[in-house]
Amino acid sequence: MKTKNIIPSLTPYKPGKTINEVKKERHLSKIVKLASNENVYGPSPLVLEKLSDFGEDLHLYPDGYARELRERVSAHLNVDMDQLIFGAGSDEIVQMLCRTYLEGGANTVMAHPTFPQYKHHAAVEGAEVREIPVKDGHHQLEQMLEAIDDKTRIVWLCSPNNPTGCYINEKQLKSFLDRCPEHVLVVLDEAYYEYVSAEDYPDSLSLLENYKNIIVLRTFSKAYGLAGFRVGYGISSEEIIRHLNTIRGPFNVTSIGQFAAINALEDQTYIKEIRQLNQNVRHEVEHFCEQHHLTYDPSETNFLLIHLPKSGLEVSDQLLDHGFIVRAGELLGIDQSIRVTIGREKDMKEFTNALSECLQ
Ligand SMILES: *Cc1c(COP(=O)(O)O)cnc(C)c1O
């Protein structure tokens, strides 16, 4: 069968090992997965309680407009209902953005390394991808501006950035937006928004009024602990949302996903607790790194990119024998590093012990 020309040069997403695979392969009884930045504490207990009530209308298609979820998110963020779009994870919104705005002859600008789905979907649409290396984990915004021309359709800003954890502060963001041409859509991916505590992290929604070319992406997959349900959303101008809606699948967010997200949004106390808890444990891991003369990129997220004196592939393989699944930096575009999700305090103590053994 003849595919689009680009398809043979692309590879399917290669998922990390599952807990069961590693258990079998390494003959271990306990595995801690610190590879995909999920919330290790899971969703709010209130969500779990409510979920047992769900099930009456499983034979019906979901509400394609996600009305109740839309009303709740719109009230929570103080934006209009028609400034929102929902997706099967923010992943799906990345795909919708590429499908709507990119094609052969157009180009798109992003950091490297950053969230790999931007590049993947841009390539599928035949657009030229311009990657600007990060510096010490931070987007190089000046170079990104220079890479923009009249064929640029989308610039991706991942803040905090996956896999480095570094964020773009308010002053840097405003200065970028002031100089970014209006024909370019700026995607601000804030998947880790709820984890950030830095004072100078921008209130991106307040910028929507003045800059008509921004879309902010958020998700229920990370701090809200609902990665398995696949619910993400975008906030933008009504015009951009209308364009995205033309290609959105009519029933793209499941009914149970909508239900879980509605209930998760209710418990903001839980989100505050998670932010604090994560920060405390991350500080302990950072402290370990400092004691062992390991550098790391400054993170405002629930993961840490740790630089190593040897191959991250090798260390991540050794860590599997200790029962820890992490991501080798080599697979993410930064050699001699590992990206580690911040887990529970006790697990992270055992993790740091294992890591120091691997480095001996
Ligand atoms: C996890 C992640 C996403 C995707 O999350 P969904 O589960 O698809 O909502 C998007 N962007 C970044 C930077 C991420 O790390």
Image (cartoon, rainbow, N blue to C red):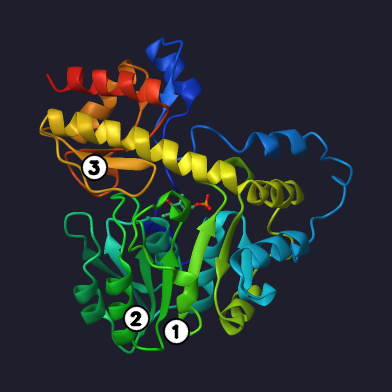
Q: Residue at x 37, y 55 (%)?
A: 116
Image height check: is 276 above or below 166? above
Measuring from the top left, give residue 241's x and y in whole percent.
Answer: 60, 77
Residue type at the position of mark 2 = Leu
The quadrant where residue 120 appears: bottom left
The residue beneath circle 2 is 177
- Badge 3, how many Cα within 10 Å: few under 14, some, many 20+? some
- Work out how far the residue at label 1 is from the one at label 3, CA to CA, in angstroms: 37 Å
Q: Earlier in the sequence, mark 3 or mark 2?
A: 2
User: Rounded to the nearest whole Å, what is the CA distance between mark 1 and mark 2?
Assistant: 8 Å
Q: Disc 3 residue type?
A: Glu
Is residue 102 visible to us here?
no
Q: Is residue 91 toward the left or the right of residue 357 in the image?
A: right
Q: CA distance from mark 3 to mark 2?
A: 32 Å
**Left or right of 77, for residue 53:** right
Circle number at residue 211: 1
Q: Quadrant of residue 142?
A: bottom left
Q: Are marks 1 and 2 in contact (CB under 8 Å)?
A: yes
Residue nearest the observer in this picture, 193 or 337: 193
| Residue 185 % position (x, y) | 43, 79
Q: Helix, strand or loop at disc 1? A: loop
Q: Is residue 131 above or below residue 24?
A: below
Q: Earlier in the sequence, mark 1 or mark 2?
A: 2
Q: Amino acid at mark 1?
A: Tyr
Q: Position of residue 60 (x, y in %)?
A: 87, 52
Q: Secondary structure at mark 2?
A: helix
Residue plotted at (21% across, 32% down):
287
